[in-house]
Image (cartoon, helix red, strand yellow):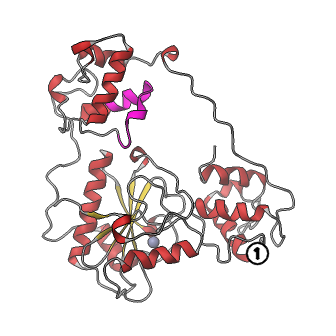
Amino acid sequence: MSVNIISRSAWGARPWNGTPNSVSLSHRTEFFVHYDGGHPVGRTGNAVPKAIESVHINQGWSGVGYNFVIDQAGNIYEGRGWNLQGAHCPGHNVSGIGVQIAIGGDQEPSDKALAACRALYDEACRKTGRTLAKKGHKDGFATACPGPKLYAWVKAGMPAGDYDAPSTPAPEKPASWDGKSFPGASAFKLGQSHPAVTVLGQRLVAHGYGRFYKEGPGPRFTEADKDAVQAFQKAQGWTGSDADGYPGSSTWSRLMAAPKAASKPAPAKPKSTIVALNSAVKPGAKHAQVKELQQLLIKAGYGPIPGAPSTYYGPETQKAVARFHNKNVHLRSAGKSYDPAIGKHGFVELQKEAGRK
Ligand SMILES: [Zn+2]
């Protein structure tokens, strides 16, 4: 079963409200299942992601917070997709791919929805080249989500009835390859998978050729790998068939060696965008920087903040700050179990969590 994903443009998504952060597939280690909760979901088709989108945009998010949404017919709708940071589970939005199965609290998930979710999980493992941890929202956050039925299904290993898992399993090391030495030219054939291709890609990235990868590197040898290899070979001063984009043993041994500092263009040191907290920004106060605080909290996954953005550091903003502190207990004021004041260290860390450098 291949995974057919209905793109944002196909279901009629609104433009992003702001710019969600990008996340490389190499950071994904978990797969979170969510439900809609509440009342049974009677919507069908594009109305399903559109309803979620309008709720999430109204609470100040960029758009649908899940990476994908699945309806009872088994349709898969693109939210943040594979490469954007979600807003579905604080603390797990980078590592976790979040998928909502659009059912209410007591609603029975359909076989088609479960099969689609399982197919998406298998695809996520294939794309990342690893076995992602299967989780329900409540494994990462105190919540009833994804409800008893979906949670039991996740804990049972996400069985998908008569649905057959794709025959491309997570890459396994052939006994003949030790994980280090040159695996032979046959490991590098366009479109074919070999664990050495993942290592190849990782070494190319280490040597400064990550720009060739839009996603991955992964176990399948793609044009991106070939282009990166070729650029690396040319940088060695090689030409012709020595720079054909297919790694031989010389290419391999040079890639496995530590990158030469001099051969890497020195990256321009990015100017820090971290700013200091104004001392007037306190619970109950009004200050222009409160808006920035709210936006950072929402971006880092501690929303929603009803009423945001506003200059008022009110109860909803304070609750979001407390959620941040519950996740970052070391930043909470000593002796407090509920800390609504962000504090200057907390404000710096929050900016980092929201993607600032
Ligand atoms: Zn959830």
Which quarter of the image is occupied by the N terminus? bottom left
Of residue 14 and residue 19, the one placed in the foreground of this image is 14
Q: Residue furthest top?
A: 237
Q: Which SS class for mark 1?
A: loop
User: What is the x, y in percent for residue 163?
Assistant: 15, 67
Q: Quadrant of residue 192?
A: top left
The magenta stretch spans residue 144: no
User: What is the x, y in percent for residue 186?
Assistant: 14, 27
Above-or-below relation of 303 to 276? below
Tell me if 30 is positioned left or right of 292 in this view.
left
Query: Where on the image, by quarter, is ligand 1?
Result: bottom left
Q: Residue at x 37, y 27 (%)?
A: 203
Quick check: can you spot residue 157? no
Q: Which residues are magenta?
A: 200-216
Which quarter of the image is occupied by the C terminus? top right
- Identify which amino acid the numbered label 1 is placed on: Gly
Residue under label 1, please give it: 314
